[in-house]
Amino acid sequence: MRYVTPNGSPTSNGITEPCNLWRAIQLVNNQVRDTFQCAPGTYSQDRLTLSGSGGVFHFEPGAELVGAQTHITDPFDHFEGGVYSIPYSGGVGTVVQRGNWIPIFVNDNYARSFYLTEPVKLKWVSTIARVVAQYGTWTHSAGRVYVHLYHGGAPTPEDELYFAPENWGSLVITGDDNVIEGLTIRNTRSTGLWVQLKAANTVLSNIKAVDAQVWLEGQFTIAERLDISHVITQGSPDHRECLNSNDGTGECWNADGDGRGLLIGRQNTSHSYRQTITDSFVHRCWNGARIDGPNTLQRSRFWGFPNHTLEGSGNNVTIQNCVCLNGQDSLFVRGAFEGWNVTNNIFINACYLTRSKTGVGGTPATLPWFFTRNIVSALTMDWLAYDVLQSDMNVWLERGGDSNMYRVIDTNGVRGFTLDTFAEILARTPGDNLSKAMHPDVLKGGMFVRYTGPEDPNFNFNDALVIDGERVGPEHIE
């Protein structure tokens, strides 16, 4: 056992003198297989790359790796409107206001609203004019940094404004058999925690990432109890759908944004495989998670996204026992996919899966995909996905009217169809013979509480839904 502190020695080789985090990782990279106990405090340093194998890092509560380097305490000069500037000659990739945070209301006007309860970094824009046009932005021009804070006023000591280089505060894992437990990562511009393609047998546990993306593209990764949030970047203030919900100049949290909290695998490749993510919570991001290739996502919760809750592609994806709430689409897949197993989930918003691009192109699948034992509100496919679908034992949330519960879109000149009731689904489709229908209001009470809206992302399972002796929807989730 070796000990690590934020201000530890950069040269320690023994177990009696605490080292800093950079030194601990260098020891593992130099073939020292050991356990490192990391003390509470703020770890602030350039990107760390763990290329060695067999390192075990236990981070105690209060230990944080942050994308914040230089605390700016000098006064700023007023430039125009809510924009202030300061001379700065160093490299800047991240600007973050860590203090004096007022929660931001993200409202897309479709009852998919939530608050950003923790600080998110300012958005980089290319010109000073764009800084003037939108709050929460910054740029570096002619030796000066220009900022437009979220509160629209002059930076104060209470704002705790920090500058950092682009990759500051991130951790990259390329070696095998490493364990990271208890780490919190905040406010990184690049991916905060990245398990790269050649890393095998990584174990991640009790990881919290705030305003820092987690990307798992290794092999045989085991990740449990991840809490990922606030990976969201505003869209352009020129977008026609922008809403002003916080009285912020040019704010656009609801349209044209960016950010995915969790990436599993890599799109259009099959090199990342057999990774398992379990008992995790992704929330308050632009998109929730994306899973590509033969990986498994299970027993996890997703809540609060202006855009897609889950996305994916590739073959042999497994999504099971997950709860997807408060997003635009619960599941969005467009492109080649087959051999998927999607079972025992709750999809409150629509599921959209096409092998074509909006009904044009695409190729027939060679493997079926399975959609069973889910609680689902709506399912849209193209003919290429519909022809190989195996669907049954689902609970359909029947809303009545022109609800588009089940839809096959026109595909390569072949006309599709739309079904608005559960009776039509039974009559028209070859599957779902053992499925049931339920009015969605039932779920507001017995199954879980307040499944949309900004007030409470938690839910409470009280009943077990059973069809033909089989459980429908997720297993009990605390």
Image (cartoon, rainbow, N blue to C red):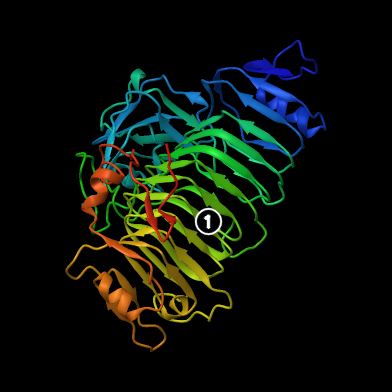
Which residue is most to the right?
A: 31
Q: In this view, does 267 lie above or below 48?
A: below
Q: Residue at x 72, y 46 (%)?
A: 200
**Coordinates of residue 343 in the picture (x, y in percent):** 47, 58
Q: Which residue is drawn at 46% across and 39% down?
A: 228
Q: In the picture, residue 392 is in which quadrant?
A: bottom left
Q: Which of 467 and 252 is in front in this view?
A: 467
Q: Which of 134 and 192 is in front in this view?
A: 192
Q: What residue type is labelled 1?
A: Ile
**Coordinates of residue 95 in the picture (x, y in percent):** 44, 34
| Left-right relation of 135 to 50 | left
Is residue 143 visible to the viewer in this orientation of the structure? no
Which residue is most to the bottom?
A: 413
**Quadrant housing the C terminus:** top left
**Coordinates of residue 296 in the picture (x, y in percent):** 57, 53
Is residue 61 visible to the viewer in this orientation of the structure? yes
Q: Residue at x 60, y 28 (%)?
A: 45
Mark 1 element type: strand
| Left-right relation of 314 to 13 | left
Q: Is residue 361 above or below residue 106?
A: below
Tell me the residue that label 1 is attached to: 291
Q: In the picture, residue 121 is in which quadrant?
A: top left
